[in-house]
Structures are given as C-alpha cells and as structure tokens.
Image (cartoon, helix red, strand yellow):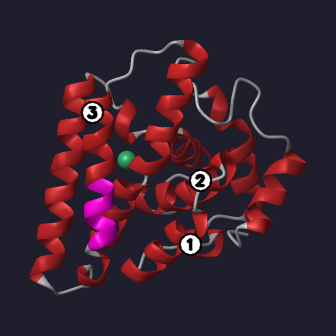
Amino acid sequence: MLAAGCADVISNLTAVLDWKLAHRLKAEEYSSFAAVLAKTAADQVLENRALIRPGLEEAAWVTVKSLVVSGVSMAVAGSSRPASGAEHLLSHALDRIAPGAAMHGEQVGIGTILMMQLHGGDWKMVRDALKEIGAPTTVKELNIPPKRFIEALTTCHTLRPDRYTILGESGLTREAAEKLCKATGVL
Ligand SMILES: [Zn+2]
C-alpha cells in the first residue's frame, strides 16, 4: 500500500504536464502554485525512494507527507487537476473493465510510465523509480489481461471530456496503444 500511495504521488508529474497542455490548448485555468506543490510532492517521493520499503517507519512518513502536499495542491487548485491526468483516466477505465484487479496507485503508476512516454518525458526514470519502491511496472503484475488493458487504454479519454489530456479528444488507436505498451515494456 505504501508503494501504491507513492506511485499515486509520482503520477503528479504527468498530471501537471496534462494540465499545462490543457492550459495552452484549451485556455483552462492554471495555477502555477498548485502545479509546483504537486510537482514538489512527486519530487519528495523520488528523492526519498530508497526509504520506501515495507516495515520502515520513514517510508510511512515520506508517503503520508507527500500525499498531504499532493492534497494541498488539489485544495489550492480547487480540483483534482494537479494530481489527476490521463494516467488517472486509464486507472478509472481499468476499474470499470477489470474491477478489483489491482490497487488504484498501482494502475496509476503504470499509466504514468505510458503518459510520460507520450509527453516525450523521462519515462524510464518513472519506471525505475516505481520498480525501486516496489510498485508494478507491467500489466502482468496488475493481473489484468492484456486485451482488457488495451481496451482501457484506447477508451479512457472518453471518461471525462472536461479533462483534456495528452490523449486528446480522440485518444489512442489500437495500434498506437500496442506500440506504446511494447516500447515501454508495460506489455
Ligand atoms: Zn490517484
């Protein structure tokens, strides 16, 4: 659960990139203060990732502190925007398609690898950090059939039309989704 909580905070990295994109393309209201707070929470986890281990008290401190900072960023923004982008849409789609298979943070972590690759960011750093804290980095670890995962990845952009993300209005084609999963080693 610590690993899942930390993965949820690491997802702020792509959530903020999606928010910036929506600000540029859709003139969505943007708070740089909220964005910095969300990013700081993620950085806090990344900087202390060696401490995220089961049975270590520091792990609970790092996780809870960064989750609280993440929560404050949402309070400042007045919405979940700084902590919820396309990686969360994917997780919500997975909740519908494969309910109860994996934890929210675990699904979101995999989504962060994928969306970071689409943003052209350092997805390998995200993957390595998730691995180090003990969070899943492959669909196999989520116990979700690959077909179902691709279904979620190609349809998740429809869940919240008000939340513009890197997936755009039409989302990923099946071919692009499969390529993305293969390129990142998620599938
Ligand atoms: Zn979340």
Residue sitting at x 58%, y 45%: 90
For the stretch drawn in magenta, the main secondary structure is: helix
Query: Which disc, if any, is residue 116?
Result: 2
| Residue pointed to by mark 1 | 137
Image quarter hosting the N terminus: bottom left
Q: Are marks 1 and 3 in contact (CB under 8 Å)?
A: no
Residue type at mark 3: give it: Ala
The magenta segment: 41-47
Q: Does any atom of ligand 1 lie closer than 8 Å to the CB of label 1?
A: no
Q: How many marks?
A: 3
Q: Is the residue indicated by label 2 positioned so its CB lies within 8 Å of ligand 1?
A: no
State the residue position of label 3: 34
- Mark nearest the camera among 1 and 3 is 3
Q: Quadrant of residue 44?
A: bottom left
What amino acid is at disc 1?
A: Thr
- Residue extending furthest right? 175
- The percent coordinates of residue 89 (x first, y second) are 54, 39
Within 10 angstroms of label 2, few (less than 14), some, or many (20 or more) residues?
A: many
Q: What residue lies at 69% left-to-right and 47% top-to-bottom? A: 153
Kindly indicate whether the residue at mark 2 contacts the one at mark 3 (C-beta within 8 angstroms): no
Nearer the observer: mark 2 or 1; the answer is 2
Query: Tag 2: residue type?
Result: Met
